[in-house]
Image (cartoon, rainbow, N blue to C red):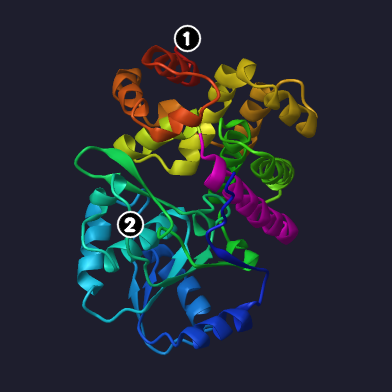
Amino acid sequence: MIYTIPSQVIYGQDKYDQVNQIIETLALENVLVITDKGLLDLGLVKSVMDKLRISNYFVEDGVMPNPKDTYVNEVAKLYKDKAIDGLVAIGGGSVMDAAKAINVLLCNNHDIAYYEKHPVLNPGHKLFAFPTTSGTASEVTGVSVVTNSLEHRKMVILGDHVKADYAVLDPSLTYGLPRHITASTGMDALTHAIEAYVSTLATSFTDAHALVAIKEITEHINKYDSEESREKLMYASTMAGFAFNNAILGLVHAIAHPLGAHFDIPHGVANAIMLPEVVRYNYDSSEKFRVIENILETNNLYEFLKTLNTQLGIPALSDFISPENFEIIANSTLLEPSLHMNPKAVNKKDVISILSQTYGVI
């Protein structure tokens, strides 16, 4: 068994002295900051960069949800000749995925689609990740998810050189997060934890991290106004990231990726929507679902998750698609690599049935 945590983790508020010591040791001179326009306008990017001892940096704020291959290819081309020697990513999962992909391209010679099927040979520049959400845990995984704009599907780019070198987990960066973002990103993390726990690649190491994450997320996801709960959610999201970086994921993500690629549904929302029905489909395939029920003190995990979605205000599948879209989603789902780690075999008919039940047409 090999258990990998690709990033060094610096956890807690006001740890910037530790970060600056690393920056000074690396002697970084030209840093590329990857973020989105919303965070830039809110002043969050300035707040972080003012605390870092980096004299010269460029800000790239064009990241959108479900980042596309065209975007990361263009940004890398723009900055490849600017002597970049480090990157800082400030944002949610889309920013982290974009930053990792751009970093790959800055130090390698092909466009991002090439690395879906070929190894990334050269390490990137040193990348510091400052997550502003508690959900994807992309800051601690060796994976970047990028949308193939021509084929309308998500590509999974992974490997030893697809990572942030330093994950700086400052919970205070999430304190002002809107409730609906806290809810959807928290459900993303919960999906990571549950899918990693029942994965065919699960081990005692991944189980330990996944179970901690499940307990903490469900206890704190509704407590939006508590700074302690925001801290617990960031901690739990990281634990879930440790788990799924090694155990990978399953059917929820296999369906959520096409929902994002074809219909631009936010990733956490797509996961939250699909999680209850996929759990019901998988339930009899693993005794581990009963362990989760014991931890959550429920005798019906499906109903627990449905109720949780309602409490959190998660939208319905019907808010985004119609039944005529099921065919294209099912076809794309069957191409997703995470299906191989799902605890139960899946065919096209199964996927359409799960979508139908989630939609409410059965």
Q: Left of 158 or right of it: where is 14?
A: right
Per the rendering, the mark at residue 362 is: 1
Residue 110 against residue 288 in the figure, above or below = below
Instruction: Work out whether residue 184 can be spotted.
Output: no
Q: Position of residue 222 (x, y in %)?
A: 69, 44
Query: Residue lying farthest front?
Result: 1
Residue 361 against residue 87 in the figure, above or below = above
Query: Is most of the magenta stretch helix, strand or loop?
Result: helix
- Give the magenta range: 225-249
Question: How far, Cα to Cα, is label 2 from label 1?
Answer: 45 Å
Per the rendering, the mark at residue 105 is: none
Secondary structure, mark 2, is loop
Residue at image coords 25%, 57%: 71
Identify residue for label 2.
Answer: 120
Q: Is residue 75 magenta?
A: no
Residue 166 against residue 115 in the figure, above or below = below
Number of marks in picture: 2
Mark 1, other Cα within 10 Å: few <14 / some 14–19 / many ≥20: few
Q: Quadrant of residue 183?
A: top right
Inspect the image, locate mark 2, and give the three-letter code of the amino acid beneath it: Val
Residue at image coords 56%, 54%: 178
Which of labels 2 and 1 is toward the front?
2
